[in-house]
């Protein structure tokens, strides 16, 4: 009942964003069960390339997107960091904000290697910094980043950038 009251207190824009985030998180979760990431990523890049991007983003759009993805992920079983990062990046692009999806690894004493995905905007981590438990982002070595262009004049292909060590 409390969740319903919280939902009613949200503005229509916040409700719409939350609904979009929920659909994206659930859809990406299902798609990652069916397709490997290397096949799914170009499909998602094509889906965002034709997205209607807003010319004037709302104030605090980045924070609202991060909030909506976190809330939606709480209700989608198995919404991993990769699912959340992909959904967050798609929403940010649709709202006209450039972002970079980072995928990194860390060496774990018992299990060998651990991977993590997060989204950066303006050089700051906006999605993927809170669900690390005893880990910190500094523990992960970024392997590569996937940038989504902010401008609608760019080609539909996603730009892949390497990291410097």
Image (cartoon, grey):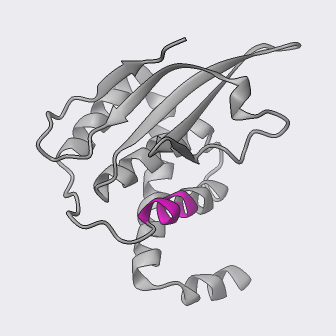
x and y percent of residue 8 in the render?
Answer: 56, 88
Q: Is residue 1 visible?
A: no
Name the quadrant of the C terminus: top right
* 52 in relation to 126, above or below: below
User: In the displayed image of the protein, which residue is found farthest to the right?
Assistant: 110
Which residue is drawn at the image coordinates 50% and 50% (left, top)? 25
Which residue is drawn at the image coordinates 41% and 45% (left, top)? 89
Which residue is drawn at the image coordinates 29% and 26% (left, top)? 159
Which residue is drawn at the image coordinates 52% and 62% (left, top)? 63
Where, by quadrant of the figure, is residue 37 drawn?
top left
Q: Magenta residues?
A: 61-68
Q: Is residue 13 visible?
A: yes
Q: What is the magenta segment's predominant secondary structure?
A: helix
Horizontally, residue 46 falls left or right of residue 88, namely left
Nearest the viewer among 40 and 69 is 69
Name the quadrant of the N terminus: bottom right
Residue 63 forms part of the magenta stretch: yes
User: In the displayed image of the protein, which residue is found farthest to the left?
Assistant: 153
x and y percent of residue 111 in the render?
Answer: 82, 14
x and y percent of residue 157 in the render?
Answer: 21, 29
Where, by quadrant of the figure, is residue 149 drawn?
top left
* 2 in relation to 120, above or below: below
x and y percent of residue 136 in the render?
Answer: 75, 34
* 107 in relation to 97, above or below: above
Q: How many marks?
A: 0
């Amino acid at each position: 009942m409390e969740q319903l009251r919280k939902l009613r207190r949200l503005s229509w824009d916040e409700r719409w964003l939350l609904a979009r985030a929920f659909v994206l998180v659930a859809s990406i979760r299902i798609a990652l069960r069916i397709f490997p990431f290397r096949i799914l990523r170009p499909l998602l890049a094509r889906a965002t390339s034709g997205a209607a991007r807003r010319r004037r983003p709302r104030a605090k759009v980045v924070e609202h997107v991060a909030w909506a993805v976190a809330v939606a992920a709480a209700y989608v079983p198995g919404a991993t960091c990769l699912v959340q990062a992909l959904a967050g990046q798609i929403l940010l692009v649709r709202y006209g904000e450039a972002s970079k999806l980072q995928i990194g690894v860390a060496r774990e004493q018992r299990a060998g290697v651990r991977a993590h995905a997060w989204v950066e905007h303006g050089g700051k981590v906006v999605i993927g910094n809170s669900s690390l438990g005893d880990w910190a982002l500094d523990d992960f070595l970024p392997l590569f980043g996937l940038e989504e262009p902010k401008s609608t004049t760019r080609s539909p292909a996603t730009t892949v950038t390497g990291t410097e060590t």
